[in-house]
Amino acid sequence: MMETFKLKTRHHDQMVDITETLEQWISDNDIRDGVLIVSSLHTTAGITINENADPDVKTDMLMRLDEVYPWEHSKDKHGEGNTASHLKTSTVGSSETIIVEDGKLVLGTWQGVYFCEFDGPRSRRYVARIM
């Protein structure tokens, strides 16, 4: 079973918590056990798992990625001018694999699943597939 989800990001760099959306999809489809693969359909947006208790973690992550990959770099050749977003996506990754047991995502106490926007704001899509 696979589903495509849509979202609109509001900022240039943004981490959107999609954990509840995925949990609701699992519940609505009466999925009990399996492996969930979540994947971004973009080269400038990724998927990651990280802390969802303290919002400063998201702020710090985006700040540090900006330090490593500044938006403007004199040696970038890519014509669209968004090389940094491609590098951030490759670093974070474009997908995550999560175990589902008894109808619940198997995540740690403080973990959440994030859609990571690195070239927004935009309309975006990601897919979830249960196996």
Image (cartoon, rainbow, N blue to C red):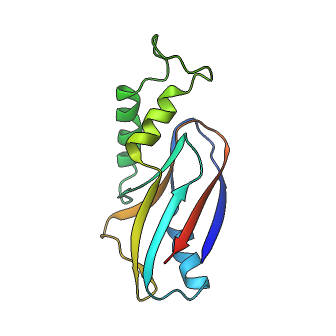
* Residue at 41% in and 89% down: 102
Report the side of 123 relative to 42 (left or right).
right
| Residue lying at 47% horizontally and 67% vertically, measured from the top left | 37
Nearer the observer, 109 or 84: 84
Query: In this picture, is 113 found above or below 73?
Result: below
Could you tell me residue 129's position as x and y percent?
A: 54, 71
> Considering depth in this image, is 14 or 39 the residue closer to the camera?
39
Relative image position of residue 91 (x, y in whole percent): 38, 41
- Count of numbered labels shown in the rendering: 0
Determine whether 107 is above or below 127 in the image. below
**Residue 45: image location, x then y, percent:** 53, 44
Which residue is situated farthest in the top direction here?
74
The residue depicted at 43 percent of the width and 37 percent of the height is 88
Residue 128 in the image: above or below residue 89 = below
Q: Is residue 42 above or below residue 110?
A: above
Quarter occupied by the N terminus: bottom right
- Where is residue 127, by image quadrant? bottom right
Q: Position of residue 65 (x, y in %)?
A: 38, 34
**Residue sitting nearer the eye, 53 or 20:** 20
| 10 with respect to 49 (left or right) | right
Q: Quadrant of residue 81?
A: top right
